[in-house]
Amino acid sequence: MLAVSAAALVTMMNPATASAAYYGSETDYTVNYVPSGKYWAPATSMTGVSVYFAMDGDYFRVKDTKADGYSAVVEWSDNHGRTGACVNAMGSGSDGTCNKNFHEGYTITYRAALYDAGQRVGFTYYWTDETA
């Protein structure tokens, strides 16, 4: 019994075993690439994060705008039950994208959020809608 308790304690204290719980069932991390020539829908923003969506190519763009230690995130869903998050963990001042593949004509709903080690600490109360 003591061995099981000690193993559980070590697991809880080891951050490598912790699981980040971002919004939805799909989690992607931004890459340091912003394609040129895209029309970016107007930003949805809050202090620390600005997010955009480009219908042409289904890109989410996530800017980390504040040195606060939080990850800038876009939480999204489509009108057929698909949900997820695009996480910019590259640090303050970074600008990155996640390339998704949505079905044409689906409504994509998204909002800006901030996360600390996989836990949401802030988000915009409103969702923005665009068509893929």
Image: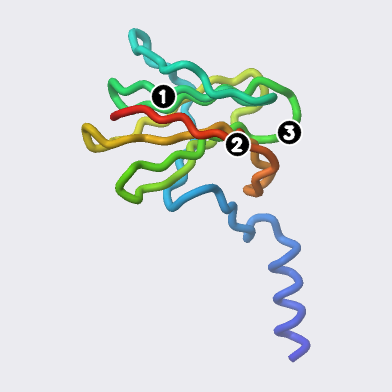
- Looking at the rendered structure, the kind of residue marked 3 is Gly
Counting from the top left corner in percent of width and height, residue 15 is at 69, 55
> Along the line of sight, which residue is nearer the eye, 27 or 111?
111
Counting from the top left corner in percent of width and height, residue 99 is at 36, 30
Q: CA distance from mark 1 to mark 2?
A: 18 Å
Question: In the image, which is nearer the foreground, mark 1 or mark 2?
Answer: 2
Where disc 2 sits, the SS reads loop
Residue found at x 64% / y 56%: 16
Query: Label 2 belongs to which residue?
Result: 125
Counting from the top left corner in percent of width and height, residue 24 is at 47, 50
> Along the line of sight, which residue is nearer the eye, 81 or 33?
81
> Along the line of sight, which residue is nearer the eye, 56 or 97?
56
Q: Up-down: is 39 above or below 78?
A: above
Question: In the image, which is nearer the foreground, mark 3 or mark 2?
Answer: 2
Query: Label 1 belongs to which residue?
Result: 53
Q: Earlier in the sequence, mark 3 or mark 2?
A: 3
In contact (CB < 8 Å): disc 1 and disc 2: no
- Looking at the rendered structure, the kind of residue marked 1 is Phe
Where disc 3 sits, the SS reads loop
Q: CA distance from mark 3 to mark 1?
A: 24 Å
78 to the left or right of 95 = left
Where disc 1 sits, the SS reads strand
Residue that protrudes farthest toward the top in the picture: 37
113 to the left or right of 6 = left
Q: Up-down: is 109 above or below 1?
A: above
User: Badge 3: how crowded within 10 Å, few (<14), some, or many (20+)?
Assistant: some
Query: Label 3 belongs to which residue?
Result: 69
Q: Earlier in the sequence, mark 3 or mark 1?
A: 1
Q: Quadrant of residue 19?
A: bottom right
Q: Which mark is residue 21?
A: none
Q: Is residue 57 visible?
A: yes
Q: Up-down: is 31 above or below 9?
A: above
